Image (cartoon, helix red, strand yellow):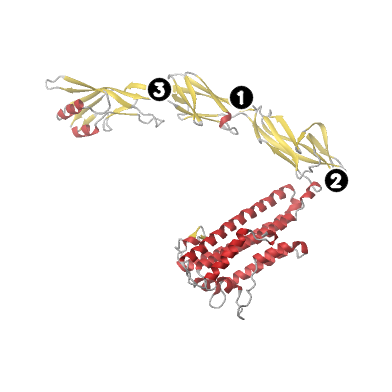
C-alpha cells in the first residue's frame, strides 16, 4: 500500500473481515461460512495482482541491469534477496493452510489442489477447534507463535533496507501496518496475544481467510520495498556514467541478396541531443580513447537511433560495428564502441508432397512448402508440367492431368516487394493404383450362400495407398450364373448393392455352383475404372 493509503477494494475487504469476525459471537450459519469463502477468494485475487505487479518490478530491475550492471547490480541483488525471503514466508503460510485442512479432513481432502487450499472445497468449514489446536496449541506453542516470529523477522529485515529518515516515513509506516503483530488493546482488563486474537475460537474457513490476508500483506509489503529499491536507481545518471552502445537488428539471419536492417542506439540517451553513429573500423588510442579509421559510414539518425542497412552478399557470419559519439555534460566528446553480427545463408526451400517425389494423376496431391524465416504469405510456388497448382487453405495442392511425365515445383519468396526464387523440386506423375473388387472382404474362392447374401454389395477397396482419403465406389457389374439348361445367365446391376434379381440368383444357387461378378466398374476421383471380376463357389 504505497503512500499508506488503502484502495476502496482494500477498505471493503477490511470492513467485511471485521463484520464477519463479529458474527462469530453468534450462531455461525452456512451463509456466514460461505461469506468467508467469498472474502478469501477476493483476497486471493488481491494476492495474485500483487504477485504480478511485483514480478513486473523484478523484470524492470533485470532490464536496467542489462543497460548498466555496475549501477543497478546492488539494488537488483537486494530485490532478489527480498523475493527469496518473501517467497519463503508466503510459502510457509501456504503450508500452514494445507496443514490445517489436512488435520481436519485427512490427506485425501478435495480442498487441496496443486499444493494450495481451495476454500470453497473445504467440507468442514465450521470446524472451530482445529484453529486452536494447530495455531495456538495446548501449551501456547502452536504454528501461530512461529508465524508471528517470522513476520517480525521479515518486517525487521524490510526495515533494514529502508533507512529510518523522514523521507522514508510513509514506506516504513506502510510496512509496519502490513506486518504488524502487536497484541490488540486490553478488553475489560484482559490482554490476549496476537495469536489468540487472530486464530482462536473461529471456524476453519475463517482461519484460512486470515492466513490468506497475511499472504496478501506479505506481497503488499514486498511491493512497498521493491518500489523503494527501484527508486534508488537514478536513471538520469545513465547519461553521465558508462554508456553502452546497443544494436537491434530486424533479423539476425538473411538469405543471399536480402537486405540486412538494424537499429543502433545508445542506452539511456539524452533526448536533448542526437548521437553520431559511425560504422566501420575503429581503434583505441594510447590515451584510451576510440576513433574511426579508414573508410566508414555515418548513419542517419531517426528518433535517437541510427538506421543501418547493408545487403547480405557474403554467405556465413558477417561482423560489423563502429562507434557511437556523444557530447558529455562538460562539453567533451565521448565515443563508445559497439559490435554485432548477422548470418547470411544460402536460400533453403522446403518442398514436399505426401508421396515424397510422386504426384498421382487425376487427384488432389497435398503440397507443403516453407522457407525458414519467411511467413506463408511471402511464399509463392509455381508449377511447370501437365496439370494445375492451386491454394487450399493455408497450404497447396497439385492435380496432374496425366501420368508418366514430370512436374516441377519452383518456390519464390517476397523480399521488399520483389520475388526471388529460392529452390525447386521435380516430381514424377503416376496413375492411382487400381482398387480391388471384394465381397465380404474376399476377392474370390469359396463362400457360403448366407455370407454372400449378407454382404449385399460389391466393394472397391484401394489397398496400401499412401493417401487414405481416396475412395472408389462400385457403380455397375454383371452377374453370371448357369440357368436350368446349363447356359450362362447374365444380369446387369447399376449399383454396388445387390438388386432383387441378383439376390434371387444367389438364393437359387446350389452347393459347388459358381457365380461370377464381371466387368466391375468403379468410380473414383480420377474417373471410372474397370477393376476386373470376382468368381465364387458356393460351399
Position of 29 with respect to 511 (left or right) is right
Q: Quadrant of the N terminus?
A: bottom right
Q: Write down the residue under mark 1.
A: 419
Q: Secondary structure at mark 1?
A: strand
| Residue corresponding to mark 3 | 431
Q: Give the image location of residue 409, x and y in percent.
A: 52, 23
Task: Determine the CA span between mark 3 and mark 2.
Answer: 79 Å
Residue 160 percent coordinates (x, y)? 72, 65
Q: Residue at x 45, y 61 (%)?
A: 110
- Farthest residue, direction left: 485
Where residue 140 appears, as percent x and y from the top left, is: 57, 77
Query: Is 338 located above or below residue 156 in the figure?
Result: above
The image quadrant that residue 259 belongs to is top right
Q: Secondary structure at mark 3?
A: loop
Sequence order check, earlier mark of 1 and 2: 2
- Picture residue at 48% right of the left edge, 21% below the top: 388
The residue positioned 27% from the left and 25% from the top of the image is: 495
Which numbered disc, 1 or 3, marks the residue that appears first in the sequence? Answer: 1
Give the number of the mark in front: 1 or 3.
1
Q: Is residue 142 visible?
A: yes
Residue 329 got which mark? 2
Q: Secondary structure at mark 2?
A: loop
> Quadrant location of the C terminus?
top left
Q: Nearer the viewer, mark 1 or mark 2?
A: 2
Amino acid at each position: 500500500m504505497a503512500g499508506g493509503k488503502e484502495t476502496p477494494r482494500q477498505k471493503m475487504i477490511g470492513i467485511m473481515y471485521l463484520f464477519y469476525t463479529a458474527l462469530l459471537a453468534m450462531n455461525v450459519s452456512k451463509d456466514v461460512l460461505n461469506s468467508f469463502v467469498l472474502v478469501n477468494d477476493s483476497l486471493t485475487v488481491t494476492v495474485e495482482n500483487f504477485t504480478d505487479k511485483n514480478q513486473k518490478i523484478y523484470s524492470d530491475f533485470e532490464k536496467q541491469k542489462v543497460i548498466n550492471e555496475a549501477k543497478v547490480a546492488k539494488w537488483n541483488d537486494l530485490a532478489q534477496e527480498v523475493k527469496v525471503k518473501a517467497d519463503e514466508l508466503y510459502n510457509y503460510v501456504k503450508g500452514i493452510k494445507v496443514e490445517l485442512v489436512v488435520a481436519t479432513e485427512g490427506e485425501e481432502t478435495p480442498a487441496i489442489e496443486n499444493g494450495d487450499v481451495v476454500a470453497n472445497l473445504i467440507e468442514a468449514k465450521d470446524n472451530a477447534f482445529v484453529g486452536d489446536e494447530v495455531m495456538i496449541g495446548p501449551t501456547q506453542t502452536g504454528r501461530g507463535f512461529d508465524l508471528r516470529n517470522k513476520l517480525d523477522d521479515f518486517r525487521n529485515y524490510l526495515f533494514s533496507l529502508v533507512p529510518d529518515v523522514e523521507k522514508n516515513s510513509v514506506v516504513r509506516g506502510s510496512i509496519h501496518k502490513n506486518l504488524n503483530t502487536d497484541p490488540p488493546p486490553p478488553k475489560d482488563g484482559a490482554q490476549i496475544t496476537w495469536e489468540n486474537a487472530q486464530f482462536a475460537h473461529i471456524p476453519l474457513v475463517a482461519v484460512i481467510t486470515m492466513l490468506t490476508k497475511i499472504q496478501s500483506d506479505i506481497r503488499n509489503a514486498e511491493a512497498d520495498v521493491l518500489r523503494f529499491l527501484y527508486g534508488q536507481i537514478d536513471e538520469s545518471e545513465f547519461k553521465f556514467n558508462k554508456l553502452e552502445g546497443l544494436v537491434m537488428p530486424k533479423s539476425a539471419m538473411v538469405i543471399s541478396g536480402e537486405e540486412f536492417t538494424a537499429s543502433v542506439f545508445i542506452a539511456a540517451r539524452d533526448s536533448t541531443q542526437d548521437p553520431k553513429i559511425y560504422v566501420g573500423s575503429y581503434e583505441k588510442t594510447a590515451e584510451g580513447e576510440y576513433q574511426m579509421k579508414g573508410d566508414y559510414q555515418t548513419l542517419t539518425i531517426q528518433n535517437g537511433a541510427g538506421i543501418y542497412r547493408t545487403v547480405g552478399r557474403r554467405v556465413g557470419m558477417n561482423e560489423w560495428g563502429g562507434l557511437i559519439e556523444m557530447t558529455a555534460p562538460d562539453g567533451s566528446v565521448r565515443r563508445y564502441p559497439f559490435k554485432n553480427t548477422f548470418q547470411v545463408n544460402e536460400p533453403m526451400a522446403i518442398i514436399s508432397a505426401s508421396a515424397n517425389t510422386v504426384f498421382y494423376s487425376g487427384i488432389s496431391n497435398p503440397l507443403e512448402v516453407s522457407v525458414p524465416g519467411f511467413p506463408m504469405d511471402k511464399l509463392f510456388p509455381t508449377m511447370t508440367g501437365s496439370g494445375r497448382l492451386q491454394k487450399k487453405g493455408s497450404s497447396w495442392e497439385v492435380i496432374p492431368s496425366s501420368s508418366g511425365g514430370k512436374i516441377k515445383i519452383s518456390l519464390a519468396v517476397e523480399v521488399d516487394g520483389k520475388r526471388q526464387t529460392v529452390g525447386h523440386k521435380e516430381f514424377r506423375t503416376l496413375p492411382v493404383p487400381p482398387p480391388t473388387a471384394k465381397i465380404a472382404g474376399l476377392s474370390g474362392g469359396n463362400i457360403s450362400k448366407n455370407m454372400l447374401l449378407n454382404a449385399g454389395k460389391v466393394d472397391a477397396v484401394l489397398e496400401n495407398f499412401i493417401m487414405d482419403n481416396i475412395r472408389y465406389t462400385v457403380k455397375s457389374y454383371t452377374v453370371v450364373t448357369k440357368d436350368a439348361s446349363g447356359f450362362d445367365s447374365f444380369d446387369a446391376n447399376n449399383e454396388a448393392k445387390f438388386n432383387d434379381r441378383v439376390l434371387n440368383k444367389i438364393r437359387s444357387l446350389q452347393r459347388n455352383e459358381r457365380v461370377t461378378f464381371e466387368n466391375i466398374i468403379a468410380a473414383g476421383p480420377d474417373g471410372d475404372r474397370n477393376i476386373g471380376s470376382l468368381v465364387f463357389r458356393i460351399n
